[in-house]
Amino acid sequence: MKQYKKLIIAVIIALIFIGTFVFLWQKGQPKEVAYQEFTPAVNDVRKTTIITGKIEPRNEVNVKPQISGIITQLLKEPGQHVEQGEVIAKVKVIPDMGQLSNAEARVRLADINLAQAQTDYDREKALFDRQLVSADEYEKVRQRLRQAREEVAAAQDVLQVVRDGVSKSNASASSTLVRSTISGVILDIPVKVGNSVILANTFNDGTTIATVANMNDLIFRGNIDETEVGRLVQGMPMKITIGALQDLSFDAALEYISPKATESNGANQFEIKAAVHVPDVSTSGKAPTASASDHPGTLRSGYSANAEIVLQEVKQALTIPESAIEFSGDSTFVYLLTGPSGDKTYERRPVVTGLSDGVNIEIKKGLTTKDKVRGPEIIADEQ
């Protein structure tokens, strides 16, 4: 019985040894190397670059008050469209005490001068009616009376403007009404009712009541690296894509390249600007909306965007995948299939390459559409 067990154990050990030997022998056998194969094709080759930037209105202005005071009423909200001259807010004047005192003194002096001119006129008219003075003397006195009346009216207007910000003679152009200086969309109103505002002067830029921009005239602003700026020329077409509007893209035309670089993260960057061609959403059959932000595809100021520019392009070029090219110094080679399908052999052949888009490369000389070239080795997944 013991001999029988020993025999079984010996057989098992022998089988394990033989199985291990066979496995290692199979693993040690050279495997057949297989390669991808490509046929040259005629395609367009483009070398492009992507520029990051943002969308901005070309004409964006800050609307400021013409007088200092307190906001009493806001008539518009951000996103609404305004026409040039349309009232955005109303301001209550806080008069300067020095100017107010001077204006009141001017009114009192004008009243005194008017009273004296009226007395002189009455006396001169009585003498003129009795033909005791000449017509020339009478006209001079009457002229002084008219001037005194005009001075009173002017002094009262000045007092009303200083005190109230508006006078009866210029009520339609009141400086207490803050009006838009351009037609466009209100981007921001940084003030609230009750806020104090000041007019622009030598020492202060003044308080911004609203920011207004023409959202039908937009530009893309971005920066491009110095290694690529030399290939740009004004008028080049661009394709603008916006992260917030994933399904929409817009055409643009390059119109400005900065002549001076700015350093950013250790690299020299040049600013560019491009005019964005905004499609007219009013042709969609919908009635125009009061707000420019109502349409889901509307461009908004400050959107982050990417601009794609074609730096070089070759149309109808003979191309192969760049992975099939062997680079050796300044020369380029391909491995051309020459043997039959059952016994493949490859011939190393020099070729002249051209433009590459990072995937495909132009072949200027050395191949035809009837050739087949070797690509990278096919790596089989190990089970």
Image (cartoon, rainbow, N blue to C red):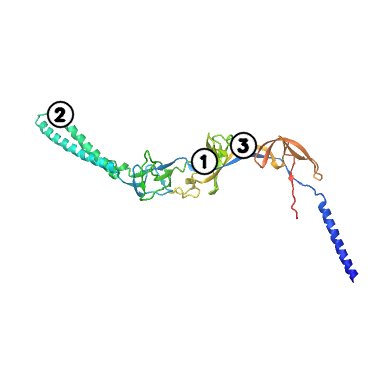
Q: Residue at x 21, y 38 (%)?
A: 109
**Residues under labels 1 and 3: Cα distance?**
22 Å
Q: Where is residue 309? Give x, y as percent.
A: 58, 39
Residue under pointer 2: 137
Residue under pointer 3: 312
The C terminus, quarter of image: bottom right
Horizontal side, residue 65 vs residue 269: left or right: left
Rendering quarter of residue 372: top right
Under mark 2, the amino acid is Glu
Which comes before the other along the chain, label 2 or label 1? 2
Under mark 1, the amino acid is Arg
**Residues under labels 2 and 1: Cα distance?**
73 Å
Residue under pointer 1: 221
Q: Where is residue 155? Give x, y as percent.
A: 24, 39
Q: Residue at x 69, y 41 (%)?
A: 322
Badge 3 density bin: few <14, some 14–19, many ≥20, Cα 10 Å = some
Q: Where is residue 82? Give x, y as percent.
A: 40, 45
Task: Check the image and report above or below for 308 versus 135.
Answer: below
